[in-house]
Image (cartoon, rainbow, N blue to C red):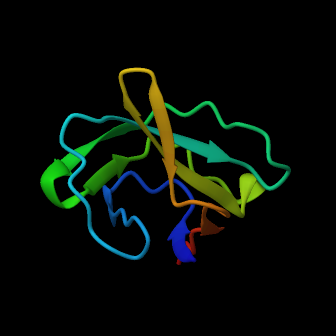
Amino acid sequence: MRHFHEGRTKAIDTQLLSNGLVFDASGFTLAIELRDRTGALITHAGSIGWLNPAISTVRFTPAAADLTVARSPIGVYYKLTAGSDVDYAPTGEGDEWIIHPRKIA
């Protein structure tokens, strides 16, 4: 579980694991799926890319409207595609992102 403020546009880096271990994801195409509190797919405007596929690290840069309190908690799944093979990380339940309102002084 990770915590972020609503409206965040700073990059979010993540280490993907397979059976608890770093893996070589070279050759895989990467996508991200975000699901809101009801499980509905979120259409986002952010970008996703590999930081280093050889050690399965990724970077998601959200757009200002992607992470909102109304959608929280957000389930996060990384989609890995190689040819016709598709897999998701993490397996089972996705990562959970809790979105908090921004505090304005």
In the image, taking residue 22 as reference, residue 84 lies left or right, namely right
Relative to the observer, which residue lies in front, 72 or 15? 15
Q: Position of residue 99 (x, y in %)?
A: 62, 66
| Number of dots carrying numbers | 0
Residue plotted at (18% across, 42% down): 26
Q: Quadrant of residue 14?
A: bottom left
Q: Quadrant of residue 63?
A: top left
In the image, residue 100 above or below residue 29: below
Residue 78's place in the image compared with 103, above or below, is above
In the image, farthest residue toward the right: 38
Residue beneath the point at 34% across and 40% down = 48
| Closer to the camera in the image, 95 or 53 | 53
Determine whether, in the image, residue 44 is placed left or right of residue 93: left
Q: 95 or 7, which lies in front?
A: 95
Residue extending farthest top = 84
- The residue at the point 45 percent across, 57 percent down is 8
Q: Residue at x 85, y 50 (%)?
A: 38
Query: Which quarter of the image is occupied by the N terminus?
Result: bottom right
**Residue 79 image offset from top left, x and y in percent:** 47, 40
Judge from the rendering whether residue 43 lies leftward or rightward of residue 12; answer left or right.
right
In the picture, measured across the screen, residue 103 lies left or right of residue 84, that is: right
